Image (cartoon, rainbow, N blue to C red):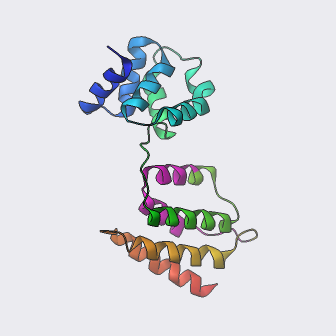
Amino acid sequence: MHLTTLAGHALSRGRTPADTYALLARRTHKPLPSARAVCLALHIPLAETTRRLNDCYDALLANPRTGSETDTGELLEALGVFDIPKSLTDTELTVVSLFLTAVDAMGGIRAGHQHGLQRWFTTGNLTAAYLSLAAAHPLPRTGDPATYWTTLVTAGELLTTTPNPDTRIKYALTHCHAQATQT
């Protein structure tokens, strides 16, 4: 049976992508083809799958240790290798563009926060991205608070126009409005 078919079967039975990877890697002792099979079973395009796996190949897949398949699967999942890309609407693309403007106006961003934002952009979880940016602050010396907060106000207003907006967006938008008036 083809690895992608096996991965699809495991996923359809409720296994997580990390568990599915571990299962295939333990059976085949081939980490790269196992990871590729999970991505393809999740309908991640081959070119994107290749890019993602190339980014982590040396660190996670080149020299696997026996018994580390579960840990490797969890790391691949945490890195976003198995994130399913969502096609964004024009409004959502505008919101992402505003988020990128806000990130620039922060004057610097922690690597973990940036990684989280990238994953949320990929999966279309713009609510989580907005809430994380609304809870952050521009850096005192290098940030541009006026641009940061007004950009987040605009993004929040757009997010409230989407069908069934999360109520937390309204609270975060109120916070961003308050911050924008103080700058």
Q: Is residue 41 above or below residue 94?
A: above
- Magenta stretch, overall SS: helix
Q: Residue furthest left?
A: 13
Note whether residue 59 is visible: yes
Q: Quadrant of residue 26?
A: top left
In the rendered structure, the answer to whether residue 127 lies left or right of residue 103 reads left
- The residue nearer to you, when weighing 123 against 141, is 123
Counting from the top left corner in percent of width and height, residue 71 is at 46, 28
Q: Position of residue 99 (x, y in %)?
A: 56, 64
The picture places residue 126, in percent across and down from the top left corner, at 44, 60
Which image quarter is the C terminus in? Answer: bottom right
Q: Residue at x 40, y 28 (%)?
A: 38
Instruction: Please tell me whether residue 169 belongs to the stretch shown in magenta.
Output: no
Q: Residue at x 45, y 67 (%)?
A: 91
Q: Quadrant of the N terminus?
A: top left
Q: Residue at x 52, y 37 (%)?
A: 48
Identify the magenta region: 115-140
In the displayed orientation, state which residue is furthest to the bottom.
Answer: 181
Instruction: Using the rendered image of the protein, determine whether residue 132 is visible from the camera's viewpoint.
Output: no
- Residue projecting furthest to the front: 90
Tell me the residue at 45%/17% (across/down): 67
Q: Is residue 129 magenta?
A: yes
Q: Position of residue 124 (x, y in %)?
A: 43, 55
